[in-house]
Image (cartoon, rainbow, N blue to C red):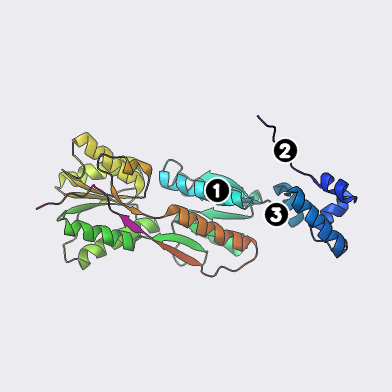
Amino acid sequence: MVPEKPRPTLKDIALQADVSIATVSRALADNPAVTQKTRERIQALATELGYRPNAQARALQSSRTNTIGVVVPSLINHYFAAMVTALQDVAEAADMAVIITNSNENAAMMASSLDFLASHGVDGIICVPDEGCADQLEELHRQSLPLVLIDRELPSSSIPTVVSDPEPGIRAAYNLLVRHNALPVGYLSGPTSTSTGRHRLDTFRQACADAGFPEQPVFLGGYEQSRGFQGANHLIGQGVKTLFAGDSMMTIGVLEACHRAGLRIGEDISIVGFDNQPLFDLQPRPLTLIDQHVETMAHRAFAVLNGLIEGENPQSRYISIPTTLIERESIRTTP
């Protein structure tokens, strides 16, 4: 194995430029104490040598930590794991470190996470908010800590927010079910204590009304596999032809219930899931599902946060990414 070439240092540049290390440091910081001609010569030499200042050095120069905090409600949930991964990737590309905290859908744990991140001097925070922490989040916002909400929103908040819009995906899914005569459909709702749970449930009910069908059965669940399993069994007992899960963890619970009951997906029962994760594409009949484009959401949230850190005002304080329906093989056609 060829040994990795050592990264050039300030000392290397100083030796080749025949100046002091302090002069190199000032020149790279564009300090006017060094003449323009010398600054340009040193900067060109640094580029030629492939010099890159480390994150700690830049932080000392800018009074930043080059670290952001991320607060999510679950790391078991593939959707939030994908969100964190996307945030880490884009932060790393910007030479930023990420501190990840998991609130476990618990307001007290989120409050502790926010206190920890703020007290450790992160440059900004991206947070999936719990409405029980609304006052704390608003206070951090008033203190001018760069802060962006993602996935969920707080009612009447001016904090920059990036969410998905469930309406295009849910309406497209419901219309598909109508065309396949796959009604009645049982909807497994997320908790109505969250903006996502409320918005998706309202959208589903409005789609039912607009299509001219009576309201379909609803199970008020939670963002957990166990609640999806319970809800699926309850709705199957009511004789629904389709199970429509309002998030990825409940989709897994729906799969578990169908497999345990011996129901063949796409033949005995139809399924619409939420979030485009690999497990759903690996079923004997890959699942039709609603894609929230979580990577896009993460990239947009980081771009807004990075702008706030740089002192920029966001062009929009509310960004909504349209969901899309991915049609696969889990919908049966009933004569």
**Residue 133 versus residue 97: which sits nearer the camera?**
97
Going 86% across and 48% down the picture, which residue do you hit? Answer: 16
Q: Rounded to the nearest whole Å, what is the CA distance between mark 2 and mark 1?
A: 24 Å
The residue where tag 3 is placed is: 64
Q: Is residue 60 visible?
A: no
User: Residue 222's x, y, as percent?
Assistant: 34, 48
Q: Rounded to the nearest whole Å, what is the CA distance between mark 1 and mark 3?
A: 20 Å
Left/right placement of residue 176 relative to residue 299 reads left
Magenta-colored segment: predominant secondary structure: loop
Disc 3, disc 2: CB below 8 Å?
A: no
Going 18% across and 39% down the picture, which residue do you hit? Answer: 263
Mark 3 / mark 2, whichever is N-terminal:
2
Going 41% across and 55% down the picture, which residue do you hit? Answer: 293
* The disc label shown at residue 89, or none: 1
Q: Is residue 249 magenta?
A: no
For discs 1 and 3, the disc positioned in front in the rendered view: 1
Inspect the image, locate mark 1, and give the three-letter code of the amino acid beneath it: Asp
Mark 1 / mark 3, whichever is N-terminal:
3
Left/right placement of residue 121 relative to residue 216 reads right
The residue where tag 2 is placed is: 5
Question: Which range is magenta?
Answer: 323-330
Determine whether the residue tagged by mark 3 lies in a helix, strand or loop.
loop
Inspect the image, locate mark 2, and give the three-letter code of the amino acid beneath it: Lys
